[in-house]
Amino acid sequence: MRDAYGSGPLLEAIFQREPPQTLNAAVLAHIRARHAVDAANAENLIAAREPSPNEQYRLPPETLGYMLRGVFDGWRRAMDFTELAILTLGDRRLTPQARELLIASLERNVPA
């Protein structure tokens, strides 16, 4: 089954080639849960932007900005966690270039 990002089969193929491991299953469950929360937050944002027949129920721009930041922050955290999971659990199967790319991406995204 594909997740909201379409990455489900790929991640499962990477992490489940070896005999079942509790860590692999936990990481995949965590990634799936993050993706589900991010998808729900994006759906809430879309619903908030739909025209309202009654203008008094329209959300103020500050609220929409807050919701947007939350959606984008969630996506960034999910991507960082997924990259870290691939780097950690798939380490033996990564090429040196892939490993360097993942490490560089994680280093760029360290909060200041």
Image: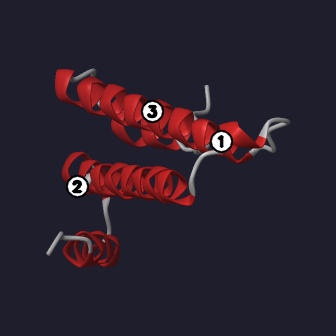
Quadrant housing residue 51: top right
Q: Quadrant of the C terminus?
A: bottom left
Rounded to the nearest whole Å, what is the CA distance between mark 2 and mark 1? 44 Å
Residue at 24% from the left image edge and 55% from the top image edge? 84
Amino acid type, label 2: Arg
Rounded to the nearest whole Å, what is the CA distance between mark 2 and mark 3? 30 Å
The answer to whether residue 69 is left or right of residue 41 is left
Residue 1, x across and y down, in percent: 61, 25
Residue at 65% from the left image edge and 41% from the top image edge? 48
Mark 3 is surrounded, within 10 Å at the Cα level, by few (under 14), some (14 to 19) or many (20 or more) other residues, namely: some
Q: Which residue is mark 2?
A: 92
Q: Secondary structure at mark 3?
A: helix
Q: Kindly tell me whether residue 57 is visible in this rendering.
A: yes
Q: Which residue is mark 3?
A: 37
Residue 5 is labelled as none
Residue 48 is labelled as 1
